[in-house]
Amino acid sequence: MASKEMKEIEELYKKEEERVKAYFRYCPFCYKEESMSFEWGLRKSYMFCKDCGAKWYLHYSWGALQGAQLINASVDGKGNELLQKEHKPEFWQAMGLKGHKALSSEKQEKVVKEREVIREIVKIRCPYCHKLYDESQDKCPNCGAPR
């Protein structure tokens, strides 16, 4: 094949990757962003997650993506119940978005809890020796004076 034809084919594959990545921004199993890679062929095309190893067969009809069939679940077993089942791209997109949002809210919740713990530590000054100590203590650990 001439180099001009090869460049045109490569350009078509790049455009199609962008269209498919719109549905698979987040992996439906590990929820990583932008982790998809592609294996393009004339008869069969595949997509896989570089992080968890999940792999799909991409089903095309009349040049448009009709569905994706999971052929390998993730390395940790997520997706075993969906093996060999084909679903529309919107199904996989919703699954990835839902998982990513849940993961993001868990991270935010952990951060908020850590902030609350830090704010609960209150120090007071001893009226006798003027050293700081925790409010939870009944007397000054430095001089022993009561609160």
Image (spheres, rainbow, N blue to C red):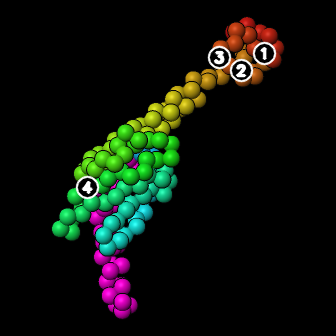
Residue that carries the numbered disc 3 in the rendered image: 135
Please state, as top left, top right, bottom left or bottom right, where the C terminus lies in the image.
Answer: top right
Q: Amino acid at mark 4?
A: Gly
Give the quadrant of residue 119.
top right
Residue that carries the numbered disc 1 in the rendered image: 141
Mark 3 element type = loop
Mark identifier at residue 133 = 2
In depth, the one of 111 and 19 nearer the eye is: 19
Q: Are marks 2 and 4 in contact (CB under 8 Å)?
A: no
Indicate which disc, 1 or 3, sits on the residue closer to the N terminus.
3
Spatial separation of the CA atoms under disc 1 and disc 2: 7 Å
Mark 2 element type = strand
The residue positioned 36% from the left and 51% from the top of the image is: 70
- Judge whether residue 108 can be spotted in this image: no
In the image, which residues are magenta? 1-28
The residue positioned 33% from the left and 66% from the top of the image is: 44
Q: Is residue 29 magenta?
A: no
The picture places residue 134, in percent across and down from the top left corner, at: 68, 19
Spatial separation of the CA atoms under disc 1 and disc 4: 69 Å
The picture places residue 137, in percent across and down from the top left corner, at: 69, 13
Indicate which disc, 2 or 4, sits on the residue closer to the N terminus.
4
Q: Amino acid at mark 3?
A: Glu
Give the quadrant of residue 145.
top right
Q: Amino acid at mark 2?
A: Tyr
Mark 1 element type = loop
- Judge whether residue 53 can be spotted in this image: yes
Residue that carries the numbered disc 4 in the rendered image: 67
